[in-house]
Image (cartoon, rainbow, N blue to C red):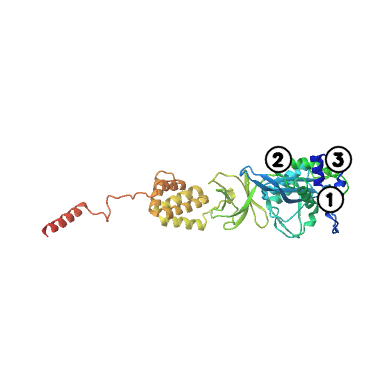
Amino acid sequence: MAIWQDLVDGHGFGEKYASVKRFVRKLRGSSTPEARVVIETAPGEEAQVDYGTGPMVRDAQTGKYRRTRLFVLTLGYSRKAVRLLVFRSSTRVWAELHEKAFRRLGGVTRLVVLDNLREGVLTPDIYEPTLNPLYRDVLQHYGVTALPCRVQDPNRKGKVESGVGHAKRTPLKGQRFESLEDAQAYLDRWETRWANTRIHGTTKRQVATMFAEERPALLPLPLEPFRYYQYGERAVHLDGCVEVEAAYYGAPPGWIGRRVQVQWNDAVVRLLNPVTGQLLREHRRQERGRHRTHNEDRPRRTPLSTQQLLHRAGKAGKHIGQLCQAMHAKHGELAVRRILGTLALAKKYGIASTDDACALALETSTREYHFVRRYLEHNPQLPLSLRQVDPLIRQLTLYRDLIENRTRQEDQS
């Protein structure tokens, strides 16, 4: 097929594909193919997705050619395919390629058959696979159910395997492109000119005609695209908060010391039960260093762990303890991290220097951790405060008499 298409486009070849096929068959020889089962699906029921190897494309950042990845989504009924090129893959890229393919088709299927690659499936299992959370939520947003194949059983998605091979052998074989946009434009032109107008070998019908029949059976697209988020796992600190990008968000009571799943984007942060997936709390995004806690989650009395921390600060230094008490009185349990930070400063710069800095913070009514930290950063070696009267300080007359006696003894000798 690739040879015939190149002859038609590049050399004005006027004969049919069968002529080239008969000629190549003579060169290839005869072989006995294995029998294969054709899986028939109803219109709009199933799509198959997979990655393949794309062409070499020059990377604008390095100026060198790089091998791309070819994403292919093939409809099970009509064999209509969407082929997209990317440089690199990730969970979000994998989900975005699905979304882009759905919008090119103008609808979605009820099932998506995929391989067990990490971007889509975290734990392969034929009975109960664990999907990647972001990929799972994207499919739920579009009303699609994922159906992973058995491990090492690619025949279940043979239609998309054939679609990947068709693109690799026909338009992309031996090709090099100067940009990813040029490569995608070339692939789209080939899709329109050759792939959509071909007579499929199994159905014996044109792909574009069958897709026109299947398109009304596709599920409608949602009004808004999926709002992507980042996700991870966090431990709940002593103040009842988890840290997300240097900001702190409160968890429900009883979760201190345990781990929760976290989802966040530019607008909200969600805390989820790691076992059931139940939404525990949802918060609006905060600036770095700020806290966000629901009023019902604030403790009515100081927990024992915080009391022990305040006692430890009081033993470290008089003014250190006073400043930590003032911060706790002002901010409540949100001050736990600031108390820990103050104790860390005492360990780094010394108790005496930190205690003097805390005394200065109390005198200026600042009473904040960041004041003590910045003061110590700019004055790491604070001068000792000298006293006028102290048991260790002797009178100057004693030093005078000592010097005179030593001088007299030397003169006599």
CB under 8 Å between callouts 3 and 2? no
Q: Amino acid at mark 2?
A: Asp
Residue 95 placement (x, y as % from top left): 70, 48
| C-alpha distance separating marks 1 and 3 | 17 Å
Label 1 sits on a secondary structure element that is helix
Which marked residue is nearer to the observer: mark 2 or mark 1? 1
Q: Position of residue 387 (x, y in %)?
A: 29, 50
Tell me where residue 230 appears, x and y as whole percent. 63, 49
Residue 223 visible, this orientation: no
User: Along the horizontal axis of the image, is 409 left or right of 125?
Assistant: left
Which residue is denoted by mark 1 in the rendering?
24
Q: Residue furthest left?
A: 412
Q: Residues within 10 Å of mark 2 (few under 14, many from 20)?
A: few
- Residue 295: tell me if it is visible: yes
Q: Quadrant of the C terminus?
A: bottom left
Residue drawn at the location 48% of the way across and 53% of the way down: 340
Q: Earlier in the sequence, mark 3 or mark 2?
A: 3
Seen from the viewer's position, the closer of residues 260 and 38 is: 38
Q: Residue 14 got which mark?
A: 3
The kind of residue tagged 1 is Val
Whichever of callouts 2 and 1 sits on the residue coming sooner in the sequence is: 1
Question: Which residue corresponds to mark 2?
Answer: 182
Q: Amino acid at mark 3?
A: Gly
